[in-house]
Structures are given as C-alpha cells and as structure tokens.
Image (cartoon, rainbow, N blue to C red):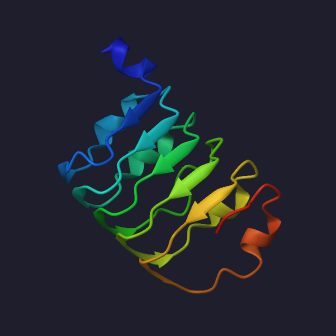
Amino acid sequence: LEFRRVLFRSDAKGNNLTGTLTSELSLLTELRQFVALNGNIGGTLPPKLGDLTSLTHFIFSNNSISGEISEDFLADSPMEVFMISDNDFRGEIPPSLFKMSSIYQVFLDNNRFSGSIGDGFGSLPNLVSF
C-alpha cells in the first residue's frame, strides 16, 4: 500500500463520479490537492479525511455532500484553497478554517451553514476570495 501515500494530486472534475467518500482516503498522507468538481458524490465527509496534513487544495464543489464539518477538520494542513460550494453542508463553519493562515480562497456558498462568521475571516492575512 505504500504507493498510495505518494499521490500528490487527485483530480476528478467533470467525471460524474458517484458514491461516497471513504475514510481510506486518509492513507494518502502526501496528498496535496484533492479536486472533485461537478460529481454526484454524496454522504458525509469522513472525519479521518481531516488527517491529511499535506493538503493545500480541497476543491469539492457541486456534489451532494451533506452533514456537518468537524470542528478541527484539516486544522493541521497548509490549506490554500478550500472550495465546498453547492453541497448540503450544515451546522457552523468550522473554527479551524479561521486558523489557516496560508489560505487565500474560500468558497462556502449554496450550503446550509448556520451561525455567524464574526471576525473569523478578517484574521486571515492572505485571503483574497470569499
């Protein structure tokens, strides 16, 4: 299984993938970019996915992912781009997102988040798109 740990980018945009995400994706310890746009992927985000500490791009817009994002999801990653628009996420925006100092793009639109964002995004020095 060692070969799984050296995948740097997974790009599945426009492939009409269906199904759900598996916690086995967390075995891709060197994964830096995870792109799955415009698919039919449903279910929830496996908590183990948050263990991907090398991830810089999480682009998962226009799927059918639902549920809440755990409070510390990807808290230890060097995240730069976080796009989860057009899904069915609920609950509050995870506080870990406001601590990702290297993040410069965040897209959360067309979900069902609740609560306020307060000054959270104002503390991100590199943020250019929200």
Q: Position of residue 76 (x, y in %)?
A: 63, 44
Q: Tell which residue pokes out farthest to the left in this image.
A: 19
Q: Tell which residue pokes out farthest to the front in this image.
A: 14
Q: Position of residue 82 (x, y in %)?
A: 55, 55
Q: Is 91 situated left or right of 74 in this image? A: left
Q: Is 117 situated left or right of 68 in this image? A: right
At horizontal 57% and vertical 37% (from top left) the residue drawn is 53
Q: How many callouts does the rendering have?
A: 0
At horizontal 72% and vertical 82% (from top left) the residue drawn is 118
Specify the quadrant that holds the C terminus. bottom right
Closer-to-camera residue (107/44):
107
Q: Is 74 situated left or right of 36 in this image? A: right
At horizontal 30% and vertical 57% (from top left) the residue drawn is 38
Q: Is residue 103 above or below residue 31?
A: below
Closer-to-camera residue (43/109):
109
Specify the quadrant that holds the N terminus. top left
Q: Tell which residue pokes out farthest to the bottom in this image.
A: 115
At horizontal 44% and vertical 67% (from top left) the residue drawn is 85
Q: Is residue 51 above or below residue 124?
A: above
Q: Quadrant of residue 28?
A: top left
Q: Quadrant of residue 87?
A: bottom left
Closer-to-camera residue (13/52):
13
Q: Is residue 3 above or below residue 64?
A: above
Q: Position of residue 100 (x, y in %)?
A: 70, 53
